[in-house]
Amino acid sequence: MNWQFNNDAPIYSQLIGQIKQGIVSGAFPAGERLPSVRDMATEAGVNPNTMQRALTELERDGLVFSQRTAGRFVTEDRTMIETAKRKLAETHIQSFLTAMSRLGYQKEEILTLVRQEATQGEE
């Protein structure tokens, strides 16, 4: 996984977001065993306690579960994964709409621009 961090939010919350994105995109498939906390922390370049905190939060959300001796796994509940995917999409859309309105665009203008960009991408 390609870990990227910025100074806008705590590292653990950025880890949560990036792991969640990995789950909904299929980089961490449903039912798959996750690497150990230590391995993930090393790969991300963060303290293992920080990674542990992020994974504990994902367990609370139900996207990850623990099996005592086998480690952590991605949930097999595809409805839960789809719900998380939808929530992430809604968050991105709201951020986009806020940024566009700050630029002075109205909703119809935004929709027109999005349609034009989507059409150009097909060509």
Image (cartoon, rainbow, N blue to C red):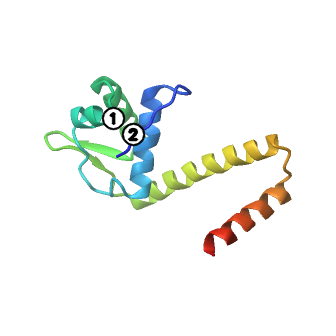
Residue 17 screen position, x and y as percent:
47, 40
51 vs 82, left or right, is left
57 vs 109, left or right, is left
Name the quadrant containing residue 66: top left
Which residue matches tag 1?
44
**Residue depicted at 84% across the width and 49% down the height:** 105
Q: Residues within 10 Å of mark 1 (few under 14, many from 20)?
A: some
Which residue matches tag 2?
3
Residue 99 screen position, x and y as percent:
74, 42
**Residue depicted at 35% across the width and 33% down the height:** 56
Name the quadrant containing residue 102: top right
Determine whether label 2 and label 1 are within 8 Å by CB.
yes
**Residue depicted at 77% across the width and 61% down the height:** 113
114 vs 49, left or right, is right
Type of amino acid at the residue the image marks with label 2: Trp
Q: CA distance from mark 2 to mark 1?
A: 6 Å
Query: Of label 2 and label 1, which has the lower sequence position?
Result: 2
Q: What secondary structure is marked by label 2?
A: loop
Type of amino acid at the residue the image marks with label 1: Ala
Q: What secondary structure is marked by label 1?
A: helix
Assign the C terminus to one quadrant of the image. Answer: bottom right
